[in-house]
Amino acid sequence: AKSQDQTIYDETSGSGSLLLKAADESEHGVTIYGQEMDNATAALAKMNMILHNNPTAIIWQDNTLSKPYFKNSDGKLKTFDFCVSNPPFSTKAWSNGFDPANDEYNRFVFGIPPKKNGDYAFLQHLISSMKSTGKGAIILPHGVLFRGNAEAEIRKNIIQKGYIKGIIGLPTNLFYGTGIPACIIVLDKENSQNRTGIFMIDA
């Protein structure tokens, strides 16, 4: 593979550290894309990319859910080889600025997340941003594994598609600013139709 023809994307890229860590794992280098809602944090991410020798990285400042920036010429969401994300946990105002039931990017095919909890909105945006052979990982609160109602329905639909390759349960107090336990959901679209189980790690 020629250098950097693979792509990596973070829908909530923060200051870019997760993107940089993941990009470091690639053998031939990757082209980096990120979107971050907060102005100062997005500026920091752009600086971070230059400091870490990724001057071609594109970091865009805006709300990913209501105004996703990375699109193809046909107006559909751009898709990537690798997607990573550590979105804000259980965000209440996730649907501000757009109507999820009539989403122009058709991201919520597995179901509409609850009004006051955006965890499955970020998960579905990430899945929509993966190529048909794409791989991904997202850090979410542990509750996404067992909460009921709309989220149970979405969870069931995603599992039936075979997109979830593994789940890593994480302990409390691991993340800055929150004590709640989290999990990493490992996604893989490649061969998803033949996937019969989910590899689960209690870490």
Image (cartoon, rainbow, N blue to C red):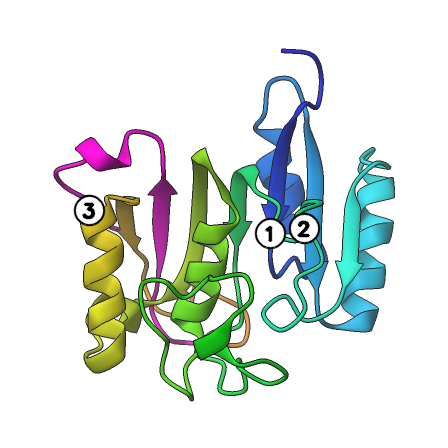
* Residue marked by disc 2: 71
Q: Secondary structure at mark 1?
A: loop
Residue at 49% across / 54% down in the picture?
A: 126
User: In this image, 69 relative to 101: left or right?
Assistant: right
* Three-letter code for the amino acid on which mark 3 is drawn: Met
Q: Earlier in the sequence, mark 3 or mark 2?
A: 2
Residue at 20% across / 81% down in the picture?
A: 149
Q: Secondary structure at mark 3?
A: strand
* Residue marked by disc 1: 76
Answer above or below: position of 46 versus 14.
Answer: above
Q: Residue furthest top?
A: 1
In percent of width and height, residue 36 lies at: 70, 64
Residue at 62% across / 73% down in the picture?
A: 66
How many numbered marks have been drawn onto this rendered protein structure? 3
For the residues bearing labels 2 and 1, Cβ distance under 8 angstroms: yes
Q: Nearer the viewer, residue 12 or 74?
A: 74
Q: Nearer the viewer, residue 150 or 136?
A: 150
